[in-house]
Each structure stands twice: as C-alpha cells, then as structure tokens.
C-alpha cells in the first residue's frame, strides 16, 4: 500500500467548502436570525436561506464522511502531547456528529414549528411567537454553541501546526500530489 501525504482532493474540496459554509451559517443564525423578532416579515425569507444552507451542509457532510471512510489518508499528525493527540480525532469525528445533530434538530424544529407552511410553502402563516418554546430549537442553539467552541480551537491548532511547529499540516489539507 502506498503511503499518501495528502487527503483525497474530494475530501479537501469538501473540507474547505464546508468550512466556508459553516462559518457563514453559524454566525448568520446567532447574529442575524436570533435577535430578529419572529414578527418581522423578512425573517421568513432569511429562515429559508438558513434552512437551505443547513440542508446543503448536511448533504455535503454526508458525502464527505463517505469519502473519508473509503479513501486513503495520511498518517495522523501528532505534536508529542498525549492528551492533545487523543483529543484531535475525537474533535474531528465530533464535527460530523455535531453537524448531523444540528441538521436533525433544525429539521425537527421546522416540523414542530410548522415551518413547512410558513417558510417552505410561503403560505403567509405567521411564525411561532417564540422558537424557544421548542426543545428541538433549544438543542439546535446549544449544538451551535458547542460547534462554535470546537471550531475555534480547531483553527487555532491548524495555525499552531502551520506557524509554530512548521510541520506542513495545512499542506495535507490542500490540493496536490498525494504520494
């Protein structure tokens, strides 16, 4: 078996596309949708964008997970710290779990809140007065906060590898010859 030094180009492309999309949808939810009153007519249109983005992320993340499972990967990068080296794979798989749970809780909230009519079918029905009454929405917000808390150290670790350790970690997650 040939040792690969970079990830599969599909995995690389999906990684960076998902990074951009997630870094767009998360702040959009926190900074635009959350403070906006449900009575604002614009919220329905913005919820539609958020929901489409979330479903697209779910689909791409599913494809990415399959590609990750069936393609050769470079050896795990370590930093020589046993705790950090054990946390890294948990964090990486944690991203999949969190994104799938985010999609599930978002979809569940859409169902219980009747967003299929007001948002998807544009029926003119008002949004619920407060999404916070739905446990699925509360879970969605909590998962979004946890995902955000995982993204920050993920980016910090990548920058640490690249600029402090100079071990070429980011090169592994870019396009180029794999062997």
Image (cartoon, helix red, strand yellow):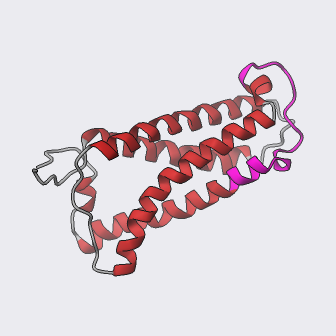
Q: Is residue 117 visible?
A: yes
Quick one: which residue is furthest to the right in this view? 129
Question: Relative to 171, is 160 above or below?
Answer: below
Residue 121 drawn at (x, y percent): 74, 19
Q: Is residue 115 left or right of residue 64?
A: right
Image coordinates of residue 61 in percent, x first then y, are 46, 41
Q: Decide: is 56 above or below 68.
A: above
Report if residue 80 lies within the magenta region.
Answer: no
135 magenta-colored: yes
**For the magenta stretch, what is the residue range?**
120-141
Q: Identify the residue at image location x=56%, y=57%.
A: 147
Q: How many marks?
A: 0
The residue positioned 67% from the left and 45% from the top of the image is: 105
The residue shown at (58%, 43%) is 25
Q: Position of residue 33 (x, y in %)?
A: 72, 43
Residue 123 in the image: x percent, y percent? Answer: 81, 18
In this rendering, would 10 be left or right of 110?
Answer: left
Quarter holding residue 157: bottom left
In this rendered view, identify the residue nearer to me: 74 or 148. Answer: 74
**Residue 12 at least partly seen:** no
Q: Is residue 38 left or right of residue 95?
A: right
């Amino acid at each position: 078996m040939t040792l690969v030094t970079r990830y599969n180009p599909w995995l690389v492309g999906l990684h960076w596309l998902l990074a951009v999309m997630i870094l767009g949808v998360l702040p959009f939810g926190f900074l635009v949708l959350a403070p906006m009153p449900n009575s604002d007519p614009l919220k329905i249109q913005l919820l539609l964008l958020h929901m489409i983005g979330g479903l697209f992320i779910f689909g791409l993340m599913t494809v990415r997970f399959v590609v990750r499972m069936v393609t050769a990967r470079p050896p795990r990068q370590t930093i020589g710290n046993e705790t950090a080296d054990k946390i890294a794979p948990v964090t990486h798989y944690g991203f999949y779990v969190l994104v799938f749970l985010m999609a599930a809780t978002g979809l569940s909230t859409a169902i219980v809140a009747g967003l299929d009519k007001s948002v998807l079918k544009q029926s003119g029905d008002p949004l619920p007065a407060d999404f916070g009454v739905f446990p699925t929405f509360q879970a969605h917000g909590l998962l979004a906060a946890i995902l955000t808390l995982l993204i920050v150290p993920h980016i910090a670790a990548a920058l640490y590898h690249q600029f402090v350790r100079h071990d070429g970690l980011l090169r592994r997650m870019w396009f180029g010859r794999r062997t």
